[in-house]
Image: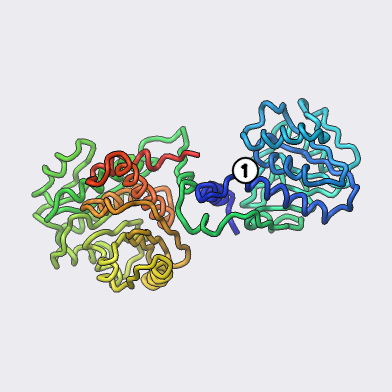
Amino acid sequence: MITSDEMAVVDRNAAALGVPTKQLMESSGNAIARVARELVPEGAEIALVCGRGNNGGDAFVAARFLTGYDVTVHLLGRPETISTDIARENWEALEQAELATEVVRDSRDLELGTPDLVVDAMLGTGITGELREPEASAAAAINESDATVLAVDVPSGVDADTGDGDGVEADHVVTFHDEKPGLSKLDATVHVADIGIPAAAETFVERGDLLRLGRDPRSHKGDHGEVLVVGGGPYTGAPALAAQAALRAGADLVRVACPASIAREVQGYDENLILRPFEGERLTPDAVPHIRTLAADHDVTLIGPGLGDDEATLDAVREFLFAFDGTGVVDADALQVVPDVETEATLLCTPHQGELRRMGGPASDGWRERRELVEAFASEIGHTLLVKGAYDIISDGDRTRVSKTGNPGMTVGGTGDVLAGAASALACPLSPVNAGGVAAYANGRAGDAVVARQGYGLTATDLVSELPKALRFEE
């Protein structure tokens, strides 16, 4: 099963991995034609009712493969309003081949005739809600027809994830790559077609994963997350880097809880940071009530950057996690206490190989073997892991992703603090696996951009300023 949003991610990832959307559309069209040939005999009349997006583009391709059939393609709307280049190219291919096409400028003008098969290719999985014109009238005409109805990916007007909605009443659905959750609720036969999307499109984090970061234009301050960074003591730069990265990764508000002895220094790194200091020179159990109170008012708490490994500090981390039931990111020295703490918290842990060993986890140089070992260890401890390396492995024990962005210049100190901060911001709107995956991908992509621009010798602050561009989706 794959949701419509996840399918959009996988489509874009496939393109990033060398399987372009144009190739996938060709395979999809071939699959539609193959199912159509199974449903009606050669010579039968087939009407394809097509929208102006890629769903319609799939059907344009199918029409070219349906030789030996009486095929008519009905386009809902003017050809110049076809919304994607590849769909437009395939429409033009139909015209060049002089296949029968009808442009429906007014939904009242749709005349299906008496076809043996109607192909519904008006709207795909990304469109939900009540049908509007011209699709509403077209759906009514399809439903009134005596023909067998084959829907492309999902019946128009039906939510692919829930099966809800009044739309086309399909007898058959041909869907691509994997079944969508809502299709099992329909009174229709579902045909799942392999269109050549590689398994790597679901394994590797790629630019399609950035689609997860869309924003509602009506949103307000705080809607995109508030992050608390608990860190500092022996080190001042680490919590500041993490907090700055959280801001650059999209959190609306970031506050830093650090020892009062270093609060002025941390504030000096960036006027955008809000300080919530606690008494003393390092984190101790005495400060835990203060930290708990602060954490309750934040969407995500990051604990670890710059705390050090003093035993009193580790006791404080244990005490905090034991009582914490929110979403947290754990980094640096704080990681070593996680396997031994019983907590109701939802945790994303961000160790490098050495820190993973100190947690009691396995180590391996080969990423494929490491993927399996990390997945097993994540299942064992009951938390999500983002294990840093040349290939970052992200797993919650059930779902595992791999990110391969980044370069040897990122061995410089502080890059892990940036990653932890970015992951904290992204854990506000996303699940831990998706937050860890996108953070690892963007952090590495930022490092790649810096090195491409100026060569090795990057610093962690270079990554911070590059993060917004690295998180921007581009086709």
Q: Which residue is mark 1?
A: 22
> Whole-percent x and y of residue 256?
22, 47
In the image, 443 versus 286, the foreground residue is: 443
User: Would residue 251 be found to the left or right of residue 86 on screen?
Assistant: left
Q: Which part of the image, by quadrant, shows the N terminus?
A: bottom right
User: Would residue 184 be found to the left or right of residue 329 on screen?
Assistant: right
Q: Residue at x 9, y 55 (%)?
A: 281
> What sort of colour scheme is used for the picture?
rainbow
> Whole-percent x and y of residue 49?
77, 38
In the image, 290 versus 224, the foreground residue is: 224
Quadrant of the image occupied by residue 55: top right
Q: Residue at x 81, y 48 (%)?
A: 149
Residue 167: in sight, yes or no? no
Position of residue 136 relative to residue 293, above or below, is above
Position of residue 333 relative to residue 150, above or below, is below
In the image, 64 versus 11, the foreground residue is: 64
In the image, 166 versus 421, the foreground residue is: 421
Given the image, on which type of amino acid does mark 1 rest?
A: Lys
User: Would residue 100 be found to the left or right of residue 213 on screen?
Assistant: right
Q: Residue at x 16, y 64 (%)?
A: 309
The total number of labels drawn is 1
Quadrant of the image occupied by residue 142: top right
Secondary structure, mark 1, is: helix
